[in-house]
Amino acid sequence: MNTKSVLQQQRAAYQPKLPAALWGNVKSVFGQPTESVADQEKIKQLFPATYGLPELTFEKADESDDLRHPINVGVILSGGQAPGGHNVISGLFDGLKSIHPESRLFGFLMGPDGLVNHQYIELTSDIVDEYRNTGGFDIIGSGRTKLEKDEQFEKGRQILEQLHINAVVIIGGDDSNTNAAVMADYYKRNNIPIQVIGCPKTIDGDLKNKFIETSFGFDTATKVYSELIGNIERDCNSAKKYWHFIKLMGRSASHIALECALQTQPNYCVISEEVEQKQMALWDIVEDITRVVLARAEQGMNYGTVLVPEGLIEFIPECKELIQQLNELTAAEHQLKMANMTPDEKVKYMCSHLTEKNKHTLNSLPDALGRQLMLERDPHGNVQVSLIETEKLLAACVAHNIQLLNEKRGKKSQIKFNALHHFFGYEGRCAAPSNFDADYCYALGYNAAQLVRSGVTGYMSNVRNLTKPSSQWIAGGVPITMMMNIERRNGEDKPVIRKALVDLEGHPFKEFAANREYWAANTCYVYPGPIQYFGPAEVCDQPSRTLFFEQEA
């Protein structure tokens, strides 16, 4: 039996808040039909049964309707963990029970595989109560198997029909919710009465649009990272002799790095989207960091902090072009030819198919980095950027610049530069959710139950107006196809939810850009400290700085 900490014991009693629209009786209000953000004709052809669905908003109803009957629902945790997943499930559970006390919730174990392989448990009140307001996905586990094939949907159908399940709720990121949309369209197209609902999860913060204001887990994870960065900054300002290079999660966008910069005010923060817009080369970034190091050294400050998003390498133009061609070389026809090759033979084969420009780029990179770009891929065919030690690469390049300068200087005017490296990733994925995420996730789950009750499919649970008091939050659903475009994956065109990049014209980035030179020249560190769960609202319930500047600035 697991021993609970004092915090866990006290936290279990916390009752998350709900939007007023979800209190008591609820009615569905449908809006205008929607279309995808891009590639409309292609997306429409791929999703003939669910394309163009209307927006949906829930409002308070004066009376209960006659549709309250038991509902059986299956739930899947898909992809990487994010704080608040357990509260989505507890909100879903409570929402189903509010519709009818005999409603049942089944959890499929270890992600989509649990659905396909018929591995599940019934989530009873005894189980759910153990996990309320806790971090992690361990209530049923998670997995990264993609649900995209008809045979997977048919295997899932067997167990869903056996358990008399009316709907499946998939809690995941952009890829997982894309799979939810494919599954929803398959069942509806084939007249199979099983609904599919998605919930927006990812600590990276890139699953967002005008309807999805933020993905759950982003608030908690960035607060965890900011606490750690603040601790390092305090140490940095105490020892006054180290430059700390800190890599942060964020493969496809720099939302985490930007949010942590707004919270902690480091001396330098790389924003990948800006690098791409300005067409900066790797050495341009290095030269700019070196400029800040030298300016601080002239003031006797041989220390500082640098934040680096993990996906930076894919935003550097020449590297991006190289990676795009290497991704094409991971397509099936090339994989077949390389099936029996040694790693060295694979490298030689791939190099022989590169353009001269990309060969030059590859040869300019450190050997270890170049080799990783060619050989390591995730299940979606993408470079595993978390394995690229970008923070060490940048620190080494800056050290090289400083060494060259010191060789030209006299012994009495040497520049001191000592670098330390950190990568914050898993530290934030399973933290106990902040009050914001606890409330938001519970509302997303409770709202998902109402989406099931309303009979819709192919929708993502949606709660908006998040910088206002929770009673004023707006609840409803957004068709998943509305968020889609076509992208190149594993050498093929695939429908996927468009990732939201940092908006360089948005208020959060502008706030950062307006202050970064001052933060670079001075020591203006902010020490956020640990997440607070008990106390005044201004300490415990604040949303992310990103959300604040987006909606309140």
Image (cartoon, grey):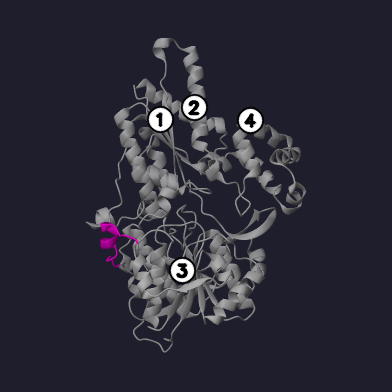
Q: Measure the alpha-carbon separation of dots 3 and 4.
A: 46 Å
Q: Nearer the viewer, mark 3 or mark 4?
A: 4
**Mark in the foreground, 1 or 3:** 1
Relative depth, front residue between 25 and 85: 85
Q: Secondary structure at mark 3?
A: strand
Callout 4: 10 Å neighbours few (<14), some, many (20+)?
few
Q: Residue at x 51, y 76 (%)?
A: 167
Is the residue 156 above or below the residue 359 in the image?
below
Instruction: State which tag comes first along the sequence, 3 or 2.
Output: 2
Identify the residue at image location x=38%, y=79%: 97
The dot on residue 461 is 3
Residue 102 numbered mark, or none = none
Q: Are marks 3 and 2 in contact (CB under 8 Å)?
A: no
Magenta span: 2-15
- Give coordinates of residue 391: x percent, y percent: 49, 36
Task: Say what amino acid the circle numbered 2 marks.
Answer: Val
Query: Which badge, 1 or 2, is on the more N-terminal residue?
Result: 1
- Quickly name the residue at label 1: 243
Binning the other alpha carbons within 10 Å of mark 1 as few (below 14), some (14 to 19) or many (20 upward) gives: many
Dot 2 corresponds to which residue?
398
**Residue, disc 4:** 364
- The amino acid sitting under disc 3 is Ser
Q: Is residue 350 above or below residue 63?
A: above
Q: Give the SS element for disc 1.
A: strand
Q: CA distance from mark 3 to mark 2?
A: 46 Å
Spatial CA span between label 1 and label 2: 11 Å
